[in-house]
Amino acid sequence: MSDRGTYIERPNRPLQVYAAIFLIVLYVPILFIPLFSFNDSIYVSFPLTGFTTKWYSELWSREPLWNALWNSVKVGAVVSVICTILGVIAARAITRYRMPGKSALVTFLMMPLVIPGIIFGVALLVLLSRAGVPLSLYTVGLGHLIVCLPFAVATLLPRFEGFDPSMEEASADLGENGWFTFWRVTFPMVFPGVVASLLLTFTISFDEFIMAFFLTGTDPTLPMYIWGQLRFPQQFPSVLAMSSLILFASFVLVFIAQWIGRMGLEKK
């Protein structure tokens, strides 16, 4: 304790050591992916035989790979927009209105976060097969929608919980109806959360493999294409190169999503 009677916070050494070990165990294995993508050999082994960028150059001549990438982008874009719209509706209803069974509803929305994805994948596959629905990018999008919706709701709930309802009441007092009040008052206030939800759900959908594994038809997404190429050793270095690019883009998108999601919250 200092002379003024205030406590000086001391660094927690065990917690710092734990955090360092956690980061090492989590991220060091991932760093081997870009490392071996520059290795001048088709085999992943030490020592490295040399430095090369030819595996990145080969990516431009692979049309199936770019088709799979475009499929993932299309599915991710559609899923992120739908999830964010549903997330805005759900977050607003949860924070603004009293309803019976609200806690049960929130628990139901968050269930995909705790239930293994393989359970949903098998269940959807059986359901769609019994209904005679052919597997395609639409079925993959449906599976991704189930996985991504809880993340959208979890991202948007803090924005609506921190929103001052008196702003909407003032708009209503000035004669605006509910629709214009939402677009002119509510939406600009929660816009950082909307952008964060779009980026986060797009990243999760883009990287999702389990649902795509069960629900993909003849048009594979990029994770499915990469999975199929792992059987061919001569294709593996190019897969590492693409994985490195995706890894970098995913980190950037998630970082931007989290940063935007915290915008405005620190000012309150």
Image (cartoon, rainbow, N blue to C red):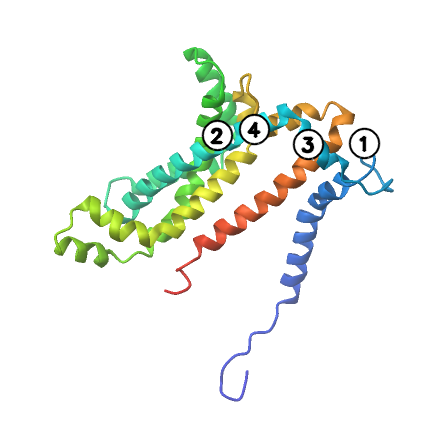
Please state which of residues 61 and 117 is positioned toward the viewer in this rendering: 61
Instruction: Sort mark 2 into few (<14), some (14-19) or many (20+) by Cα contacts within 10 Å.
Output: many
Q: Disc 3 designates what residue?
A: 59
Instruction: Sort mark 1 into few (<14), some (14-19) or many (20+) by Cα contacts within 10 Å.
Output: some
Q: Gap in Å between the C-alphas at discs 4 and 3? A: 25 Å
Q: Which of pointers 1 and 2 lies earlier in the amino acid sequence? A: 1
Q: Tell me, yes or no, whether the two marked residues, 4 and 1, touch with CB atoms within 8 Å.
A: no
Mark in front: 4 vs 2? 2
Q: Disc 1 designates what residue?
A: 42
Q: Gap in Å between the C-alphas at discs 1 and 3? A: 15 Å
Please state which of residues 60 and 247 is positioned toward the viewer in this rendering: 60
Q: Quadrant of the C terminus?
A: bottom left
Q: At 58% across and 26% down in the image, what residue appears? A: 68
Which numbered disc covers residue 75? 2
Q: Quadrant of the N terminus?
A: bottom right
Q: Disc 4 designates what residue?
A: 210
Q: Is residue 251 left or right of residue 56?
A: left
Q: Is residue 223 left or right of residue 158?
A: right
Q: Tell me, yes or no, whether the two marked residues, 1 and 3, touch with CB atoms within 8 Å.
A: no
What residue type is disc 4 on? Ile
